Image: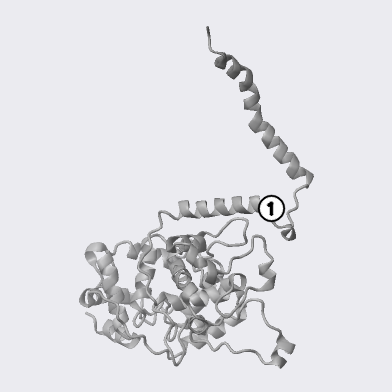
Amino acid sequence: MSSPWPRRLRRWLPWALLVPPAGIIVAVLVAWSGAINIAATAGHPAWLESFLALAMRSSVRAHSSAVKVPPLDTDLLPLGAAHFHGSCAICHGAPGQPVNPTFAHMLPHPPPLQEHASRWRTGELYWLAFHGLQYTGMPAWSGAGRGDEVWAVAALLRELPSMDVSTYQAYAAGNATLETPEPHQLVQDGTPIFPTATCDRCHGTAEATAVSPYVPRLGGQSRAYLLRALREYRVDQRQSGFMEPVAAALQEENLAGLADYYAALAEPRQPSTFAGDLQMGRTLALAGDAQRDVPPCLSCHGEPKRADVPRLAGQSGQYLEQQLLLWQAGGRGQTSHGRLMARVAQRLSITQIKAVSAYFASISAEDGLAQMESAP
């Protein structure tokens, strides 16, 4: 006697095959009808809220599993805090700064990160800040390919739950003085939705060095180079999640004034603790490496005839290494200057990158010019 299951399977199989197409048709019809209320005021049913939260957490966990967390030193915290305060705190709040009511009524609600950041691993925080989240208002990092910058934000988020108000505000203000406006200023000028962004928040001043060795020294750079850099940030030819939003908000008439200001700024030097073979670095700076087809660094970076390139002497080793590694990995190649530097960086070994970064961090701009003039 034959089993009844094959007969039953043949009977129900055609109907089973119709279920997925029928479900899709029903879903499309429901969407087309407008029956679903997508207003933020409507909220999500509890079951949908739980489902979306499960899907989001599982997705972040799965896609961030390959992220390798590097050592995150405290020098990253001021840079991460400055960016967080100007770009993230308005939605997510910060120590001493509540979430803006407008953004608190988004759906889904932006979580207060001082309370919620500890629920995520460091690699997950990095992934979230770099890639953003669909359908939440959480954008991806605006500097395409600049995952190196995002570690500053991840470092800040990792420490945020245990950070008190005074420590956070000191990090976030950097070299800037963030004063409470007087009543007459509020009457005349109002207050911006986003916290005021100032260059001093990250960069050096006449009295203080940059807030982090991962921030470039601008004081004493040429006007031509500073103008070129700002314009490249504005049109997305040079990528940076820190600088692109700031440069895009500037008016063209502001750029010349900023370039003049920093070109004339006598910024104090930052003491260098960056380790590397100084003699190897000096050789690369003055003579290059003929076997690797690497030209002398100072043949461009220091001579007056190349005013549109930055002076390297006096920059921090961490910043120089970061930029060379970025070029070596294929970043910053959208301009002729960037493509030239990418070719040079890709011919350098990691040891040479550390050596030349340490060397330029150990000398002043004047020393660099003097050594170039005395080179054979």
User: Taking the image as drawn, is residue 359 in sight?
Assistant: yes
User: Where 18 sits versus 169, above or below?
Assistant: above
Task: Name the quadrant containing residue 245.
Answer: bottom right
Residue 159: % across, % down: 45, 73
Residue identifier under label 1: 45
Q: Say which residue appears at 49% left-offset and 63% top-offset.
A: 119
Does residue 240 appear left or right of residue 248 in this picture? Answer: left
Residue 231: % across, % down: 54, 73
Q: Which of 238 and 124 is in front in this view?
A: 124
Q: Nearer the viewer, residue 62 or 234?
A: 62
Q: Say which residue appears at 74% left-offset and 61% top-offset.
A: 41
Residue 3: % across, % down: 53, 12
Tell me the quadrant of the picture where the C terminus can be found: bottom left
- Dot 1 falls on a residue whose secondary structure is loop
Q: Nearer the viewer, residue 250 or 70?
A: 70
Give the residue type that dot 1 points to.
Pro
Does residue 373 appear left or right of residue 92 in this picture? Answer: left
User: Taking the image as drawn, is residue 237 in sight?
Assistant: no
Q: Which of 172 and 165 is in front in this view?
A: 165
User: Where 58 sits versus 203, above or below?
Assistant: above
Q: Say which residue appears at 28% left-offset and 74% top-offset.
A: 356
- Residue projecting furthest to the front: 1
Residue 193: % across, % down: 66, 76
Q: Say which residue appears at 47% left-offset and 54% top-offset.
A: 61
